[in-house]
Image (cartoon, rainbow, N blue to C red):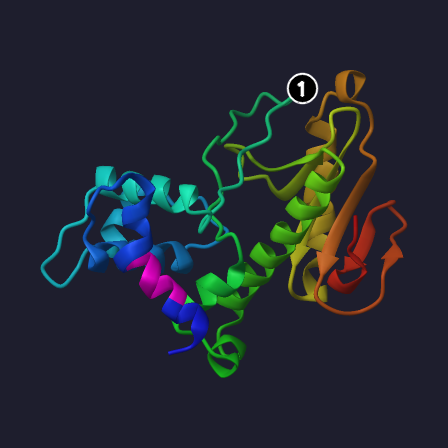
């Protein structure tokens, strides 16, 4: 078993006990971890994770999932991304559920038992894992200068993967694995920026689409296209 897989196995069987001394079912813990991996970078509810983790004659409840996730957060295995809802002029009701991530996306890969070949054959899953990787890096960079990372989604379906808020300024980013998705991502960023009350928060310091490959440049609409290799604090 790869080292990352051994680490997850140890979490499910021993480490999670060290959080508060409460004994938990190792098989259920492993099932919840796998479900979070299948739903990485999404706003999967406790109910959907519970349904996904149940099986083989074992019923996992919403309450149990909430308990396990809290313990995994304390172990710094998962790190949810909260919703950004400050100074918005939009009338659309906000979705406040966090997006679910591992502290490192390699843990999601191990939980899924994914390989280079299986991920190449499943670009949708690869895209979510790439998004989680980028958001991990953005969170680290933002924290290095006192900033925080959020996501945005409202009832109209408009969503933005990352909002970096440093108090005095802010920026927003979409994350796309393929360059063919840049136009749609830029459109989402433009519509999101129109919903922010800039009289209270100011204009965005940057709007950017982060991609896996290619060159960095600034589009005619002012939105930056940023390859992941060019990211930095």
User: Where's residue 141, x and y in %?
Assistant: 72, 46
Q: Which residue is at 50% across, 75% downward?
A: 119
Residue at mark 1: 87
Q: Residue furthest top?
A: 200
Q: Position of residue 209 (x, y in %)?
A: 74, 52
Residue 8 magenta: yes
Residue 49 shows in this picture: no
The N terminus: image quadrant: bottom left
Viewer-closest of 230 and 51 = 230
Tell me where residue 125 appears, x and y as whole percent.
49, 65
Q: Which secondary structure is most common in the magenta stretch?
A: helix
SS label for mark 1: loop
Q: Nearer the viewer, residue 102 or 151?
A: 102
Task: Judge whether 206 appears above or below 119 on screen.
Answer: above
How busy is the neighbourhood of tag 1: few (under 14 within 10 Å), some, or many (20 plus)? Answer: few
Judge by depth and name the residue closer to the eye, 29 or 203: 29
Residue bounds of the magenta highlight: 7-12
| Number of residue marks | 1
Image location of residue 179, percent across then percent down: 72, 65
Above or below: residue 232 compared with residue 202: below
Residue drawn at (20%, 49%), measured in percent from left and top? 24
Residue that sits furthest to the bottom in the current view: 117
Relative side of 86 to 227, left or right: left
């Amino acid at each position: 078993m790869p080292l990352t897989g051994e680490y997850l196995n140890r979490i499910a069987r021993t480490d999670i006990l060290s959080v508060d001394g409460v004994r938990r079912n190792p098989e259920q813990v492993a099932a919840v971890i796998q479900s979070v991996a299948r739903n990485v970078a999404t706003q999967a509810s406790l109910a959907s994770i519970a349904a996904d983790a149940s099986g083989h004659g074992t019923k996992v409840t919403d309450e149990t999932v909430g308990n396990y996730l809290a313990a995994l957060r304390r172990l710094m295995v998962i790190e949810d991304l909260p919703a950004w809802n400050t100074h918005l002029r939009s009338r659309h009701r906000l979705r406040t559920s966090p997006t679910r991530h591992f502290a490192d996306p390699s843990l999601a890969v191990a939980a899924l038992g994914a390989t280079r070949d299986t991920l190449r054959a499943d670009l949708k899953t690869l895209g979510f894992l790439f998004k989680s990787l980028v958001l991990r890096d953005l969170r680290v960079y933002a924290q290095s200068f006192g900033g925080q990372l959020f996501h945005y989604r409202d009832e109209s379906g408009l969503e933005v993967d990352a909002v970096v808020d440093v108090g005095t300024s802010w920026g927003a980013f979409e994350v796309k694995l393929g360059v063919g998705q840049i136009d749609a991502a830029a459109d989402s960023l433009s519509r999101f920026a129109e919903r922010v009350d800039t009289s209270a928060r100011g204009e965005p310091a940057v709007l950017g689409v982060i991609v896996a490959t290619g060159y960095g440049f600034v589009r005619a609409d002012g939105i930056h296209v940023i390859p992941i290799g060019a990211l930095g604090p």
